[in-house]
Amino acid sequence: MCVGYVVGMRFESTELTGTELLLQKEVRDFLAAELPRGAFVPGLGMGAARDPEFSRKLARRGWVGMALPRRFGGGDRSAVERFVVVEELLRWGAPVGHHWVADRQSGPLINRFGTEAQKERFLPQICAGELSFSIGMSEPDSGSDLASVKTRATRVEGGWLLNGTKVWTSGAHVNDWFIVLARTSDESDRHQGLSQLLVDLRSSGLRVNPIPFLDGTAHFNEVVLTEVFVPDELVLGEVGMGWAQNTSELAYERGGPDRWLSTYLVLEHFLRERAGCDADGRVAMLLGEATAQWWALRRLSLSVARKMDRGEAPAAESALVKEMGTRFEQDVLRGVQRLVDLEPSLESPSPFEQLLARAMLTAPSFTIRGGTNEILRSVAARGLRP
Amino acid sequence: MTDPLLIETAERVFSDTCTHDAIEAAEREGWAPDIWARVAEVGLPWISLEGGSLVDALAVLRVAGRHAAPIPLAETGVLAGWLLAASGLAAGEGPLTVVPGRPDDTLELVGDRLSGVAHRVPWGRAVEQVVALIEVAGAWFVAAVPRTGFAVERRSNLAGEPRDTVTFDGSAQVAPAAQGVDASALRYRGALTRVMLMAGALEQMSRLTVGYTNERVQFGRPVGRFQAVQQHLVQGAQEAALVGTAADGAARAVGGGPARFEIAAAKLLANRAAHTATRAAHQAHGAMGMTREYALHHLSRRLWAWRSEYGDDLFWSSTLGAAVARAGPEQLYPIITSGSAVLEL
C-alpha cells in the first residue's frame, strides 16, 4: 500500500479493525432502538440539541469520555474508537449538545495537562455524562489572534483573580465549567505568559449575558469575569504555558467528523423526500460527488485520529482537513438547494425542509467556529513548508 | 503491503530516466525507447503478471505519475497484460497497449480476422501488440494483433502522449475473455490506473508548488509567505491528500474484490482535482508555470488529459450517484463508511 503524503504532512491510510467495526454496529443498533427515525427531531451535527438524559444514557454505554483512562471512569478506548461512536451520533442527528465539548476537548485536555486531583475531580463526572463544559478562548478583541487575549489573572493569596470578557461562549448559560485562556504575566514574546484556568460558570463575579444567534436560538453568550477568584488547584497545567496547551486543545477540536457532517442529514432527508424524480440526472450527479467526497474526507479524518493514538499532535493535518471539510459542508447545502424549488421554512412539516432551513441559517458558522478557514490555511501552510 | 524496496527502485529508475529533457524529447519524438529500456530492464511493467501483485503494480504507477513517465506502463502490465493473461494468450516481450474502447470505434471480429478502426490507443505507434476486447454475439473475446498487423495514424492527448488511431484489417490471436472480463471491467481497471497516475502527479504538483513559492521572492519575501498564495498551496495539498487516500482505498479494495465503489469515487475525485489543483498550482506559479521550460506542464497537462480517460466527471458522478440513489437513504452512511462492501455498481 502506498503512503499518502504531501510535503511536510503524512496521511497514512487506515481501515477500521474488526473490533472497531463491531463497535460501529453496536452504536448503530443502539441509535435505531433509542432514537428511531421520526420519533425525534434530528439536529445538524454538533449543533444538535442538548439532552442531559441522553448524554447519561450514552455514558452508561461507555461512550462519553471513552478515550479517557479507566481509573477516572473512562474506557481506555482509542481516539479511533471515539471517532467511530461520534460519527454515528452526528450522522444520526442525535442530541449530543450536553456532553459535546467536555467529551471532545475539555476531558482530553484535563487528562493531558491536569493534576491528579483535577483528574479525580472532573474526569469521572465527564465520563458519566454529568459535567458539561464551554470553551473560554475568544474575546471581544481577540478572535483569530488568540495570543492577544486581555482577560487577566492576577496573583493573590492562594490563587488568582480573573478579570475580562469572553464571547461566543456557546452553552455558558447552562454548562457547568469552562476553561479560560488568560494572561498571567507580560512577556516580550506574547505567546509566553498565558495560562489556562478551570472556571466554574456559577462563580461569584461571573455574569453570563445572552447573545442571540441569527436564527433566534439562544446558545451564544458573553461571559463577563469581574474579580472571579480561581484557587491555585484549578490552574490547568503549568502557569505561563497556556499557549502550547491551547494549541493542543485546538488539535482535539479540529479534524474530526463534526467538521464534515453538519449537513449530512440535509442530503439524507432530501434523498428520502425529494429524490424520486431525477429526469435530467442532476440528483445522481450530486449524490455521486457528495458520496465520493465523504468517503475520502472520512479516510483523511480517520488517519488524523490514528495519529493521535500514536501520541502525535497533528495540528497541520487537522487544520487541512477541517478547512476542506467545512467548505464541503457548505457545498453540500448549496448542491441540494440547486435541486429544489421551495421557500425554506423552519415551520414546515417536512423534516427535510426544516433541516434545509436550519442549515441555511447556520452554514456560515461552519467555516468560522473552531478557527476560521483563513487561520486554518495559515496553520496548514506552515505545515507544508519544506 | 508493497515492499518499500520496490518503491525505492521505481523512484530511482524514474527519477534517473524521466528528466525534464527526456520528457520533452519523448513528446517531440513520440516515443521514449531509452526510458522504456531502463524501466523494462528492472521488470517494472510486468510486476502484476510475474510474481508481484496488482497492488504492487499500482504502487509503481503512482511513482510513475509523480515523474510523468512517458511510457505505456499502465497499458503493458495492468491492462493489456491482464487481458492476455486472463485469456491464456502470451504477453511476449516489449511494450503492449490496449484499445480503450471509444464510442466511435468500429472494430469487428469474424473468426480470427479483426477489422475496423480504434481511437485513442495509447502509444499505438510504439508497441509490439495491440490488445482489444470485443463483443461478438453477447460473448467477450480478447484479440491481440502484432505490430505488423495494424496501421497507425499519429494522434496525441493534451499532454502530448500518443493516443493513436489504429486501423486493423487482418488476422489476430483470439481467445474467449475470462469470466467477468468485459468492457465495464476494463473501464474500471483503466480508471484505476489513471487514479494511481493522477494521485502521483498531484503529489508532485503540490511539492513543486510549495518549493517554487518558497524560493520565488517578491516584495522582499518568498511569495509562499503571502496568505493569498498560501490558499493555493493548501488547496493543492488538500486535493493531493484527498486523491491520495482515495487511491490507497481503491488499491486496498481491489485486493478483496471488484472494488467498484472505491474506483468510481477515486476517479471522480481525481477528475475534480485535475481542475481545482491545477488551477491553484498554476496561479501560484504565475507566468513561469505557463512556460515549456518549467516542469509544471508535464503534470498539469497530464492531469487534464487523464481526467477524461476511462470516464469523465459526468460518467462517474452519474454512475455512482444512480447506484447510491437506488440503495436508498438508509444505506447512504453505510456506503460512506463501507463502500463496495455494501454497494454494488
Image (spheres, helix red, strand yellow):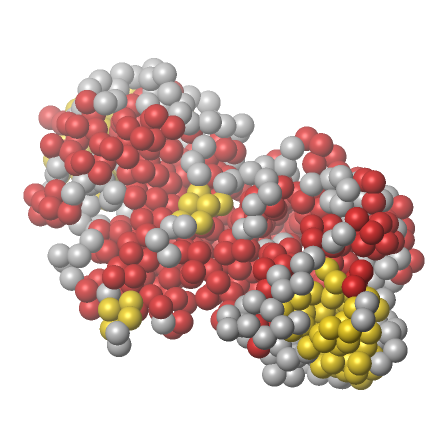
x, y percentage for residue A51? Answer: 87, 62
Q: Is residue A57 left or right of residue B154?
A: right
Judge by depth and name the residue closer to the eye, A308 or B191: A308
Q: Which residue of the protein is positioned furthest toward the front in this rendering? A: A157
Q: Work out whether B67 lies above or below A263.
A: above
Q: Work out whether B166 lies above or below A354.
A: above
**Could you tell me if residue B162 is visible in this image?**
no
Q: What residue is shown at x 34% (from left), y 31% (from top)?
A: B7
x, y percentage for residue B190? Answer: 37, 38
x, y percentage for residue A208? Answer: 82, 81
Judge by depth and name the residue closer to the eye, A165 or B218: A165
Q: Is residue B331 left or right of residue B134?
A: right
Q: Work out whether A73 lies above or below A178.
A: above
Q: What residue is shown at x 33% (from left), y 66% (from top)?
A: B224
Task: Give the mark count.
Answer: 0
Q: What residue is shown at x 55% (from left), y 72% (from top)?
A: A187
**Could you tell me if residue B55 is visible in this image?**
yes
Q: Work out whether B58 lies above or below A27.
A: above
Judge by depth and name the residue closer to the eye, A133 or A87: A133
Q: Classify residue A216 by image quadrant.
A: bottom right
x, y percentage for residue B189? Answer: 40, 35
The C terminus of chain B sits in image quarter: top right
Q: What residue is shown at x 79% (from left), y 68% (from top)?
A: A159
